[in-house]
Image (tube, rainbow, N blue to C red):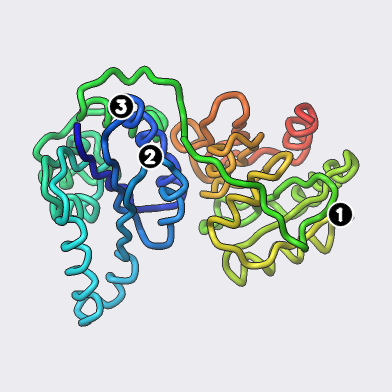
Amino acid sequence: MRSILLVKTSSLGDVVHNLPVASDIRARFPEACIDWVVEEAFADIPRLHPAVHRVIPVAVRRWRRAPLSAATWGELREYRTAVRSERYDLVLDTQGLIKSALLTRQARGRCAGYAAEAAREPLAAHFYDAAYAIPKNLHAVERNRRLAAAALGYEPNLPLDYGIAAEPLAAAWLPAAPYCVLLTASSRADKLWPEAGWLQLAAALNARGLVCVLPGGSAEERERAARLAGGMAQAVAAPPMGITELARLLAGARLVVGVDTGLSHIAAALGRLTFCLFAGSHPELTGVHAGDTAINLGGAGAAPTAGQVVAAVTERL
C-alpha cells in the first residue's frame, strides 16, 4: 500500500476520533504515505500526528454561506487540484455524509466508505467503489478503525493509539502551581453543565492544591469562563488560543474535566486523566475513549450531579 487519503472533515471531536486510523495504517503499512482532508478550522489536529504527511484543508462551512461566489469556486478548484495531485491506492471516507462523499469522489483512486445501512447519510454510500457495513452501535473510534481495517484488508486488533503528543504550554499567565483544565463550553446548550456544579467542583479541586484554568473559544464562551473563574478561589480564565496552543495547555494539566466537546476528546487522546460530563448525548457512542484515563459521567437527558462528579474526580487524585 503506497498512498492513502483519509477524508474526515469535522467536527473537532470526530476528527480526534479518526486519529487512531492513521496509527493503525502506519502500524500495518509502515511505508504508506497518509494524507488527510479536513475542515480548515480543525487542520491542526491531523498535523499533530507524525504519520500524516499532508493535510488538505477544505472550507465547506464557508462555502455553504456563499456557494455561487467567485472565491468559493476558486477554492473548490484549488481543492480539486490539490487532491488530484496524487493517485491514491485508497481514498477512505470515515465521515459517511454526502458532503464528505463528494469530496472523496474528487480524488484519484479507489474510494471506500460506510455502506448505506451504516452511514450517517445513506446516500453517501452510492459514491464509493466499495462500501462496508460496520455496526452502528460501536463507539465512533472503533467504527472508524473497523472501516479502515475492512477497506485495507487487515484484522482490527491493534492496541488503541491516537498517535499524538504535545509539549506542555509555557505561558506567563499560567499558574505556577499544578493546574487542572475545566472545559465548560459547548456549541449545544443541552450539553452544558450547571454553573453551580462547576463552582462546587472547583472548590474541591482548589482544596487539593490545584488551580483551575478555564479556556473558551468564542467571546461568549470566554465571558462564561471569566464569570465562572471569578466565583472560584483559585482560577484563571485563559486568553484566546488556537487548537495547537490548547492541546499544549491540556498536555500540561494534572487532569481535565469537560462537557462533551472536542477539547475533552483531545485531552483524552493526549493521555490526560479526563472526565467528560454528558447531558445531551450518548457516551457509549461518542464519549472519551482512551482506556482507564478516560471517564464518562452521565448520559443523554441524565447529567451527573455535582456530588457525583466531585466524588469521581477526587477519588482519582
- At which x and y percent is residue 117? 20, 34
Say what secondary structure mark 2 lies in.
Answer: loop
The kind of residue on which mark 1 rests is Gln
Label 2 belongs to which residue?
Answer: 51
Label 3 belongs to which residue?
Answer: 146
Picture residue at 75% right of the left edge, 50% below the top: 198
Picture residue at 16% right of the left edge, 63% below the top: 81
| Residue at the farthest bottom position | 70
The kind of residue on which mark 2 rests is Ala
Which of labels 3 and 2 is toward the front?
2
Between disc 1 and disc 2, whose residue precedes? 2
Q: Estimate how packed mark 1 is, as few (under 14), some (14 to 19) or many (20 or more) residues with alpha carbons within 10 Å.
A: some
CB under 8 Å between discs 3 and 2: no
Disc 3 from disc 1: Cα separation? 44 Å
Between disc 3 and disc 2, whose residue precedes? 2
Picture residue at 30% right of the left edge, 62% below the top: 58
Say what secondary structure mark 1 lies in.
Answer: loop
